[in-house]
Amino acid sequence: MFNSITIPAMLTGFVQSVVDKATIVTRAYRSFVANILSIKGQMAASTEKHVCPLCGTVMHQHGTTSITLIHTPVMHVFADRTEIEVERARYCCPSCGCTKQQPIPFKAQDHCITTALERYVCLLMERSFTLKQASQITGLNPKTIKEIDKKRLNNLYTVNGEGKVLKKPKRYSRYLAIDEFKLHDGNKYATHIMDLETGEVLWVLPGKTKKIVYDFIEHVGLEWMSHVVCLACDMNADFASAFKEKCPHIDIVFDRFHIVKHFNEDVIAKVRKDEQKRLIDEGRKEEAARLKRSKYILGKKKENLQKADEKAGTVRRKGSELFNFPETQRYGGQEARLRGILADNELLLATDVVKEALSEAYNPMVTEEGMPPRRKTMKEMQWEIEVIIIMCDETKNEHFKKFGRLLKNHIDGIVTFAKYNLSSGKIEGFNNKIKTIRRAGYGYPDDEYFFLKIMDASRHGHAQK
C-alpha cells in the first residue's frame, strides 16, 4: 500500500478515496503476470441538472456505477501499468426510464484510458517510439497505441481529421523531387513527392506510374503548381513526361547521383570484368590478378584516394579479446595501385579520364585565370557533356557507347543542373529513413498508416506551422 501516492489535479473532478489507498495488485495481463498500480476514487458530486435526452424531464440520481481507466505510468513505483477506478453517479428519468451516467471529462473519447495517457502516447509516437516500445512503457495494447497514433496523424494531415482526403500544402514549393521506394516484397513499390527546401513529403501513393503525378497535380491545383520551377528526379521517363505534360513551365533536373551510378555500374564495373576475363584468356594471369578488388579505387576520385592514403596505418576497427577478432588498420598505396592499373590498360585509363571529366562537368563553378569564380552556364556544361559523349564513342567499346547514348538522350535534363545546382539527394537519403521506419515497426500491413508515418517522419514528428 502506498499512502503517499496521489493523482495529479489534471483529472478534473476526480476525488481520490480516503479509505482505499493506492495498492499494487498482481494479475495475468497480455500473456504475462503484471504488477498493476490500482488507485480508487469517485467523481465529485455534480450540481448541474441532468435532462433526459428523449423527453426533456429532469433526471434523478439512481445509484452509482464504476469504470476502470488506464492512466499515465507513475515513474517512482515499479508497476507495469497504472489504473484508476472511478465511481460515478447514475441518473434515471422518472418519465420514460431512460438512464444516463455522470460524464467523466478526463476519459478519452474512444478508449478506456485517461486523456492524459492519450496525450502521453501521442508524445511518445511523435518522438519516433515504435508501437512495441510505447506499449511496454504505457501498458496498452499495441493495437490501441496504433489507433491513437493514427488518429493523431489523421488530425495532422487529413481534412477535418477524417482520414479521407489529405490536406493541401500550406505553403508553395519551388523545388520538388519524386522517387519510388520498395513497399513490400514481390516488386511492390510506392512513390513519394517531396519539397526539397523543407524536406516535407507532400504526396505518397502505391505504384510508380504517371497517374501518381496526375493525382498530385489535381490535388494541389494548377495555381499551386505554377509556383514550382524545377523537379529533381532520376531518369524515369514516366515521371518527367507526366510533369511536363501538365506543367510545361517546369524544368527537369536528372540527378547526378544516378548518372555517376550508371557510369560506375555499367561502365567501370563491366569493363573491369571484361578486361580481367580477356587477360585470363590470354594467359596473363598475374595482370588479371591485379584487377581483383579494384572496383573501389577505379570509381573513386584521385583526391579521395590521396586522403585515404594519408590515413594509412590508423585503426579501422578495434579488436576484441572477448569475441576473438583482431584489430584492423587502414591500408595505403591506393593511389599508386590505381596508377599501376591505368598504365597497363587503355580501356581502364579511358574510364578514369571520363570519370574525371564527368566530375568536372558537374562542378557548378568555373575558375578562370585572373578572374573570380563564377557560376557555370548551361551552355558550358552542355559542351562538356558533349565532349564526354565523343570520348565514349571513340573508345569503340559497347559499354562506353551505351553510356554515351544515355547522356545524349537525357542531355536536356542533365545540363539543367548548371542552372539550379539541384540534386535529389535529400529524397534519396529519406528513402533510407523509410526503410528504418519499416524495419522498426517489423513491417506495416496497413499501408495507409505507413504512409502517414512517412509524412510525419519528414516533418520530424511535428505538424506544419
Image (cartoon, rainbow, N blue to C red):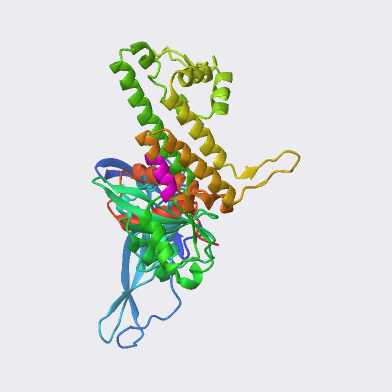
> Which sits in the foreground, 347 or 458?
347
Q: Quadrant of residue 436?
A: top left
In the figure, is residue 45 to the left or right of 26?
A: right
Q: Residue at x 42, y 33 (%)?
A: 395
Q: Nearer the viewer, residue 294 or 457?
A: 294
Residue 174 locus on image (x, y percent): 54, 61
Which residue, as the protein is rendered here, is positioned at the far right? Answer: 370
The stretch drawn in magenta includes residue 407: yes
Q: Residue at x 34, y 56 (%)?
A: 449
Pick the residue in front: 5 or 368: 368
Residue range of the region highlighted in magenta in the rendering: 402-409
Badge count: 0
Residue 26 visible in this rendered orientation of the protein:
yes
Give the answer, above or below, for where 211 lies relative to 336: below
Q: Quadrant of the N terminus?
A: top left
Residue 80, percent across and down? 36, 43
Of residues 199 and 305, the one nearer the viewer is: 305
**Could you say which quadrant of the image residue 208 lies in?**
bottom left
**Residue found 54% across the figure and 55% down from its top:** 198
Relative vertical location of residue 281 with respect to residue 36 in this rendering, above or below = above
Is 303 left or right of 70, judged from the image as shown? right
* Image quadrant where one finds the C terminus: bottom right
> What secondary structure do most residues of the magenta stretch adopt?
helix
Magenta-span inclusion, residue 362: no
Picture coordinates of residue 197 (x, y %)?
A: 55, 55
Q: Quadrant of residue 245?
A: bottom left
Query: From the viewer's perspective, is 124 left or right of 198?
Result: left
Residue 237 location (% of width, % of height): 37, 55
